[in-house]
Image (cartoon, rainbow, N blue to C red):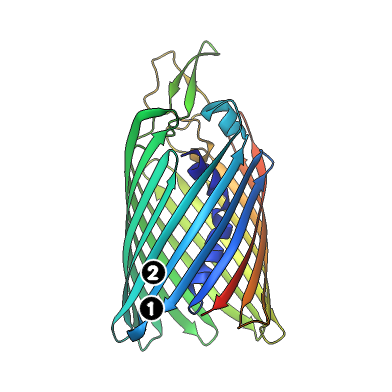
Amino acid sequence: MRLQLIIAGAVALAAAEARAQAEVEPAAVAGVRVYADDDHVTVWSPSARATATLPRGVVVDAHVVMDAVTAASIDVTSSASPYAFAERRLEGGGGVAVPVAAQQQVGATVVVSDEHDYTSLRVGGRWRGELARRNATLELGYTAGFDQVGRAGDPTFARDRREHRGVVSFTQIVDRRGYLDLVVEGVRTTGYQANPYRFVPVTMAGAVAYALPEAVPTSRDAVAALVRLRRALAPAWFAHVDYRLARDTWGITSHTGSARVVRALDDDEVLLGAELRGYLQDGASFHRASYAGELGAPVWRTRDHVLGAMHTLTVGATAQARLPWRGAQATAAAAWLRFGWGDDLRQRDRDAIVSSLTVLVPL
């Protein structure tokens, strides 16, 4: 459970890599990602993925990821335990995509992950079709999530969490040099959504009087919309810009904007890219820098600064090159992340570095 929360800092770079891998031809991909920050957290994530095409255009893929974390973060030493710890998470999954008609495809995915106090299952399906003489693409997807949250050292602690996620994605060719993407996503999460290791201090007369287990609502609905423009600026220059707006029933509104530019060299043998991403959110309606108990214990209470006002800034760079072996290619990426929390009394900001190296071999 603690590992699930800690590795969230690497999401931006991981998502960019996943998008790139999803667009390649059948291939085998292996790589490693490293996250390290100035709050004594390090995560190593080796991974492997394979995609193959079977008769009649059926595409299958499988992947495995391991996250190994060591942490002595203030988030850990002030709540989960007074000492540093090391944990591992193992994830595996697969998918299949089947043509069902001209320019139409259906698919299904299954992803399972496990760590000593948290298990997760995701089962999803999607439909994809090309429209308007193949000038537009529409994709509909749904994923159901089944999680069980445990607590180390307490075999009687087991809480369920359920998730329903739906996505509608539309891509339109704008002209000979650009695409426009529109994505709308809705998520409903029910069940236990707190951290079983986190206790929240309650003050009386300005001093800490006692601490209570974290408690947050058991239902959370969220909706997000994204617009992205991808465009060729010149024969060897490409760029995309996007903006995402999200809102949930806990009162959090977030804004994400990013811009990326890619330069092709040596007849596309080498690609160099740079990306700038910013994220801004306000806090949940029940989030407080501190909770007072003079009028009774607060019903909802949390020390999770991710539920408070926060912002992040990411500056990243990538380099991709073809290798002289069976059309293979290698991609190296690195990003600097700055996290900031407006009302966290323990830590106002955090710096992190995320780096990765992947090798892709066409099949």
Seen in the picture, residue 240 relative to 245 is either above or below; the reply is below
- SS of the residue at dot 1? strand
Residue 58, quarter of picture? bottom left
271, 94: nearer the viewer: 94
Which mark is first along the chain, 1 or 2?
1
Left or right: 284 in relation to 41:
left
Residue 344: in sight, yes or no?
A: no
The amino acid at mark 1 is: Thr
Left or right: 193 in relation to 201:
left
Seen in the picture, residue 338 relative to 28 is either above or below; the reply is above
Q: Position of residue 216 (x, y in %)?
A: 38, 33
231, 267: nearer the viewer: 267
Residue 335: in sight, yes or no?
A: yes
Q: Which mark is residue 137?
A: 1
Q: Disc 2 designates what residue?
A: 169
Label 2, label 1: how many angstroms apart (C-alpha)?
A: 8 Å
Q: Residue at x 61, y 83 (%)?
A: 327
Residue 340, quarter of picture? top right
Near mark 1 (Cα within 10 A), the count class, few <14, some 14-19 or many ≥20, is some
- Farthest residue to the left: give it: 100
- SS of the residue at dot 2? strand
Q: CB under 8 Å between callouts 2 and 1? A: yes
62, 139: nearer the viewer: 62
Q: Position of residue 68 (x, y in %)?
A: 57, 47
Q: Position of residue 355 (x, y in %)?
A: 66, 57
The amino acid at mark 2 is: Ser
